[in-house]
Amino acid sequence: MKTTIRPPKKSQFDVGLHVFPLSTAKTYLGRLMEKAEKGEQVYITKGQRRFVLSPAPEIEPIPIRPPGYFNCQTKAEIEEENELAKASVIRPPDDLE
């Protein structure tokens, strides 16, 4: 009995393309993100709709306001406004890199 060795299946993912159906984009999202990061246009299609995959700019936090920014008179009001100022700072999520 003769056994035949088949060559490994070649991936159907063509890196040279710029338009990908959603099912393919899900499978190769990491590679598509790398293409988009390099500045290449990457389109993901779902039916007749097209979406562009592009990197988003980094989110910069809003700085904490200096003392006296809110023109408060009492120490209690200053402490309250400082607590509110700390809560109003938008920090980027830890899982973004």
Image (spheres, helix red, strand yellow):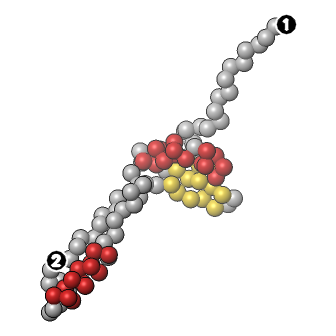
- Quadrant position of the N terminus in the picture: top right
User: Is residue 15 at all visible to an observer of this figure?
Assistant: yes
The residue positioned 39% from the left and 60% from the top of the image is: 93
Q: Could you say where residue 25 lies in the image, as x and y percent from the top left?
A: 60, 48
- Assess whether mark 2 and mark 1 are in contact (beta carbons under 8 angstroms): no
Disc 2 marks a residue whose amino acid type is: Pro
Q: Could you say where residue 57 lies in the image, as x and y percent from the top left?
A: 36, 59
Residue 90 in the image: above or below residue 75: above
Q: Earlier in the sequence, mark 1 or mark 2?
A: 1
The residue positioned 59% from the left and 37% from the top of the image is: 14
Q: Which residue is mark 1?
A: 1
Between circles 1 and 2, the one closer to the viewer is 2
On screen, residue 91 versus residue 40, left or right, reads left
Mark 2 secondary-structure assignment: loop
The number of discs equals: 2
Q: Could you say where residue 95 lies in the image, as x and y percent from the top left?
A: 42, 55
On screen, residue 75 versus residue 90, left or right, reads left
Q: Nearer the viewer, residue 19 or 68?
A: 68
**What is the distance, in whole Å, between disc 1 and disc 2 at their CAs?**
84 Å
Residue 24 in the image: above or below residue 71: above
Using a 10 Å C-alpha cutoff, classify the residue at mark 2 as few (fewer than 14 neighbours), some (14 to 19) or many (20 or more). few
The single residue placed furthest to the right in the displayed view is 1
Disc 1 marks a residue whose amino acid type is: Met
Q: Nearer the viewer, residue 52 or 84?
A: 84
Q: Which residue is mark 2?
A: 66
